Structures are given as C-alpha cells and as structure tokens.
Amino acid sequence: MMELIAAIPWPEIGEASLDTLVMLAVSMLFTLILGLPLGILLFLTGKRQLMEQTAVYNVMSFVINILRSVPFIILLIVMMPVTEIIIGTSLGVQGSIPPLVVGAAPFFARLVETALREVDRGIIEATQAMGASKRQIVFGALIPEALPGIIAAATVTVIALVSYTALSGVIGGGGLGDLAVRYGYHRHQNDVLVVTVVLLLLLVQFLQMLGDKLVLRFSRR
Amino acid sequence: MSTILEFQNVSKHYRVRQQDVAALHDIDLTVEAGEIFGIIGQSGAGKSTLIRLVNLLERPNAGRILVDGQDVTQLDELGLRTLRRGVGMIFQHFNLLSSRTVAQNVAFPLRIAGLWSEDEIRSRVAALLDRVGLSEHASKYPAQLSGGQKQRVGIARALATQPRILLCDEATSALDPQTTQSVLRLLDEINQELNLTIVLITHEMNVIRTLCDRVAVLDEGRVVESGEVVDVFLHPGHPVSRRFVFESEDVDEELLQTAFEHVDGRLIRLTFRGDTTYEPLLGRVMREHELDFSILSGRIDRIKNTPYGQLLLGLNGEHISEALDHFRHAGLTVEELR
Ligand SMILES: Nc1ncnc2c1ncn2[C@@H]1O[C@H](COP(=O)(O)OP(=O)(O)O)[C@@H](O)[C@H]1O
Ligand SMILES: [Mg+2]
C-alpha cells in the first residue's frame, strides 16, 4: 500500500491540480464577463421584453445554438488557429482558456436568460410604474430578483467547465486531464487515473456545495 | 372640484397573432381631484388595460389621456418618468421585490427618482411605514409577511414619491374579506388625509360600495353606465350593473319578478337615502292615507357615508297615488312595479 502511494507522482499531481484550478478560475472569470451581459441582452431583446429587437435576438440566439451544439472536443480543435492568434499559443494553460470560454459563455448566457425570464413580469411593471429607466429596471430590479437563479446558472457552468478543462488536457492543455491521459492511458498507471478522478470529484462536490450555499444566501422567497 | 384625469375617446386593441383584439372602445371618463373613482367590470372587460393607460404601461391606439390637463401620450421619456413619479400604483399580487426588505422596497421609488438624500429617504420611509402600521416589520423580507401586510407595503411604496393619483389594480382581490376591509379603510383614510385621488378597479361591488364616490361600469371594453355610486347602486340602469348590484346583495332578480305574484294590491319600491332613511315616514304616510301594507323585501345599509334604505312594499287601499306623492314630496324615490 505504502509503495503504491509512493509510486504516485505527487509533485506532478500537485502541479496539475494547480493548473486545473487556474484554468478553471480564469475561464470562469471570462465566461462571467462575457456571458452575463450576453444573457442580459438576450433576455432584453426577446419577445415582449424591455428592448424587444427580434432580429438582434434571433441572430444572437442562433450563434449561441451553434456554439452549444458543437461538441467541445471539436471546438477545441477548431479553435486552435484562433487561439494561436489571440494568445500566441494553443498549448498549455494559457492556450486552453479561449476554447473553454467559447464553450462555456454561450451556455451560461442561455442559462442567465432563463433565470431572468423567471422574474415575475409584475415586478418589472411595478418598477416601470415608479418611473424607473431601463438601466434602473435591469440593475435595480431584474438582476437582484434573478440573482439566486444566476448563481445557480454559474454553478452549473463552472461544473461543466471542470469537465471541459479535463478534456482540454487531451490536446495538451495541461492540468489533471492531461495527467490522467499521460499516466493512465499511455502508461496504464491506473492509480494516477483514480487519484485524478477523485480530485475532480472533490472539486465538483465543493463547487456544487458552494453554489447551493450562495443560492440559499441570496434567496428571500 | 377640478378635473385631474380625463379619458377622451380612448380606444385600445392588442395585436395577437397578426390580429387586432379590441380591448377598449371610445372611453370617455372624467375623474375629479380628491375623489375615489371605481371601475367595475367582469374579468376581461378591459379594466386593467384602462387603468394601465394612465401611467402608460399600455399605450392607447386612439384618443387622449389627460393627467392634470396634460396629454400623457405626448410625453417624451423624461416627461413620462416624471409623470409616473406623480402617479402611484398598487397591484393585485403586490409586486414587491422579494430581494429587498420592506424598508428597501418603500425606499426604492425614492432612490429611482434620485431627488432625495439618504437622510431624507430614511425618515420618509420610517414615516410611511409608521402610517401603514408596519414599523416593526421594516427589516423583514416580503416573503415573511401576510397578504394584507404586503399590500400595506405596496401602498407605502406607492405613496413614497407623494403622488397625486393612486391607481389600484384589483388591490384587494387576493385578500380575505377581513383584510380587504382593513386595506379599504386604509385607502379611505389616506384619500382624506392627503386629498389623494384614487382610481381603483375591481370586480366586487362591495369594494365600490365601501370606498368609492363615483363608479363606471365597464363591459366588453365600453363604459355602459357611470355616476355616483349611490345612484348606480340603488338604481342600476344597465343589465351588467344590475347583475353586480344584485350579486353583492344576494338578491335573485328573477325571483323578485315571480315571487310576489300572489301578493294582493300594488307593488311599490321605495328608496330612501341620507337622513330620510331614519325618519318614521312609512308609518306616518300609511296612517294618514289609510293604507294596508306588507314589507316584501328590504335592505338598509350605508354606501360609503350615505345611509340608504330600499323597501319592496305590497300596498292596499283607496289612496295609493296620494301616498306615493307624499313619499315623493319627502324626497324618496318611488318605483311602481305593478
Ligand atoms: N397583453 C395583452 N395581449 C393581448 N391581449 C390582451 C393583453 N392584455 C389584455 N388583453 C385582452 O384584452 C381584454 C381586456 O383585458 P384586461 O384589461 O386584462 O381585462 P380585466 O382587467 O377587466 O380582466 C381581454 O380580452 C384580454 O384578453
Ligand atoms: Mg385585470
């Protein structure tokens, strides 16, 4: 037993874990930065909403659907040249960020749109009736009211990103996925495979718990 | 009194699947400053559409809507927001922000307007919550309140920017009868204290009777009857108005026609209102004109602050027409049904 544990390349696992966390944090940050405004815009331009713009909505919606229907592994490959232009390399932690964001942001935007649609129309109307501007309605009423839903959406997204980061390891993104492929697949070192899976599982558990806690914290219903 | 709100020839239709669905036809209404004006109608009659035109939550397709003499349909973005600050609104389902405390909900319109300092907002919110009796619930969230309390928050919020008009869209329809009464009482007090004009819509005649000075009856997008509540309530002219009145009184109109077929003599309906309600007129007239009478049905109650009585009498005797003249002279309304 002790030998088994000793045979596991712990320093490498530590490094890979750190890489995964960095990928996750940076890609989630950009997913939020891009996906949140996109989701809000998607909601606002929708049918019978505050800034109804059917053409704009349809275009955005179509692009989001395309991006969401591409399997992530394909997106990784297709994105490589683009990533090289943006970052300078399509490898390593840095190179994995653009495909992760492009994969996750449309998904998150759609979930944000859904969360905003859950807000009672009456609340928007009451705020309108107070003489609020559109900006005040969005930031004063819509987003605060949808916050628990938006946090839940972010939780689902970040967990999806965990599996995306693992997958991006396959094409040289680094992190735990990369480790699992190198040791587990190429060298048949199943113990390393198990350790990476357990670590990913713990990460997902932790993120879900954190998300649920925050949702509860912001729910006043 | 001066006019504060006027609908002139207002029509509104909705577009549903490439088709126009008419909601309001040629509405003409005038609301005087300081009065409580009720609009009653069945579900789908167009009440919500009508009241939502006042603060332009809906836009009319034709006609003018004047608030304080100004046509609201001509206002630009900024003008509209100023108008809305001067027109409060409360809703059937309260529409409070669940993410904000009671105090924050009441402060919300003040923050939106951006015309007051933090200190002013705090003291104004405190005063409003005190007025509606919710001071101790200031830091609770709406989900922790009862329906009646939520509507009080709604009222405090609607009054925050000191509007001149308060719109009530079925404000008590989600409340139990007792809570309804207390909310109606609050509205009545506020109307008097602030000289606030209230426009309310409802499908319940009792709300109209308890609170309103004047009423318009809306049916299929048209005003079919309007006037003083006392008049409409005691002498409803349109079948729809009649149905509302009789429903609220638990009277079966058909039964009234047939139930007294076997009763001898003339059938007369007398309506007293105001102080004559309490005078011993009936006995005096009957004695003087030597008539026999039986009381077949009757109601004595108040409409807002006016006491009234309505009696259905069977009369026998020689001098019935003299007696009826006597009643008319005394200010009663006499209807000869048979
Ligand atoms: N947003 C809308 N879109 C389409 N039709 C509507 C809309 N709002 C109301 N209507 C229609 O207009 C008519 C009047 O509705 P409403 O004003 O809500 O009546 P009430 O409040 O008296 O129940 C109804 O026939 C209703 O179906
Ligand atoms: Mg309605």
Image (cartoon, helix red, strand yellow):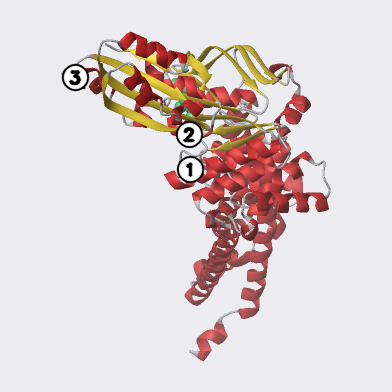
> Residue B131 at x, y = what percent?
66, 49
Tell me, yes or no, whether the two marked residues, 3 and 1, touch with CB atoms within 8 Å.
Answer: no
Look at the numbered discs 2 and 1 and tell me whether their residues touch, using CB distance below 8 Å: yes
Q: Residues within 10 Å of mark 2 (few under 14, many from 20)?
A: many
Q: How far is the residue under mark 3 from the one under mark 1?
A: 40 Å
Q: Amino acid at mark 1?
A: Thr
Q: Which mark is residue B180?
A: 1
* Left or right: where A135 falls relative to B291: right
Q: Quadrant of residue B195?
A: top right
The residue that label 3 is drawn on is B263
**Residue B109 figure quarter:** top right
Which x, y percent locates residue A211? 57, 61
**Image height check: is B55 above or below B89?**
above
Residue situated furthest bottom in the rendering? A2
Q: How many marks?
A: 3
Chain of the residue displaying label 3: B
| Of pointers 2 and 1, the one earlier in the residue sequence | 1
Q: Secondary structure beneath disc 2?
A: helix
Disc 2: which chain? Answer: B
On the rendered structure, is B274 left or right of A14?
left
Residue corresponding to mark 2 = B207
Same chain check for tags 3 and 1 = yes
Q: Nearer the viewer, residue B266 or B160?
A: B266
Q: Secondary structure at mark 1?
A: helix
Q: Amino acid at mark 3?
A: Val
When the figure is inspected, residue B99 is found, relative to residue B17, above or below; the finding is below
Q: Earlier in the sequence, mark 3 or mark 2?
A: 2
**Image-quadrant location for residue A204:** bottom right
In whole angstroms, how far apart are the C-alphas of marks 2 and 1?
Answer: 8 Å
Quarter placement of the C terminus of chain B: top left
